[in-house]
Amino acid sequence: KEIAEAALRNSRMIVMDDMENILDMINSYAPEHLIIQCLDYEEVGNRIRNAGSVFLGSYTPESAGDYASGTNHTLPTGGYARAYSGIGLESFMKRISYQEISEDGLTNLGSAIKVLAEEEELMAHSIAVDIRLRKLTEKC
C-alpha cells in the first residue's frame, strides 16, 4: 500500500479528447510502458512510434510483460524510447550488412554519395564513385 501511495503521489493524469493530440503526446513523451485500453486499441497501437513496450487491450497488464508474455523487461526509461529499443536477443547477435548497387543504381546515387563524402571531407569515398562512374561511361 505504501509503495502504491508513493507512486500515485508522483503520478500525473493527463486528460485529452483529441486522438491526434493524444498520439503526438505519447510519441513525444516516449513512455517506458504504454497500456492501450480502448475499443480500437489495435489501430491506436499501430500509430505508436516511441514506447519501450506497448500492452494492447483489456487483458494485457504490464505485469504480463514483466513476467510471462516473453517480451523484454529491460526497457528504455526517461523518454529514451524516442531513440532506443529495449534489450532483446538481437542485441547479442552479430549482424552483417550486405549491399549491391546496380549500374543504374550507382548512376542515380553517385552524385548524392559524392556530395555527402565531400561534405565530410572523405575524398577517397568521392573518388571511389568517380572511378566506377568513369568505367560506366567508358563501357558505352
Image (tube, helix red, strand yellow):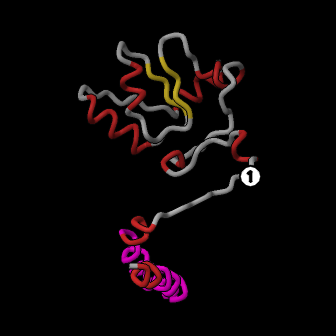
Residue 13 screen position, x and y as percent? 40, 28
The reply to whether residue 82 is visible in this rendering is: yes
Name the residue beneath numbered marker 1.
94
Q: Is residue 43 magenta?
A: no
Q: Residue at x 39, y 69 (%)?
A: 109
Is any part of residue 117 visible from this angle?
Answer: no
Is 88 left or right of 82, judged from the image as shown? right
Residue drawn at x 40%, y 37% is 26
Asked which secondary structure carries label 1, the reply is loop
Instruction: Place residue 137 in its image quadrant.
Output: bottom left
Corner quadrant of residue 72: top right
Residue at figure coordinates x 43%, y 17% from the top left:
37
Q: Please report the bounds of the magenta region as a residue range.
A: 108-133
Callout 1 environment at 10 Å: few (<14), some (14 to 19), or many (20+)? Answer: few
Please tell me which residue lies in front, 36 or 4. Answer: 36
The location of residue 139, given as percent across then percent down, is 43, 79
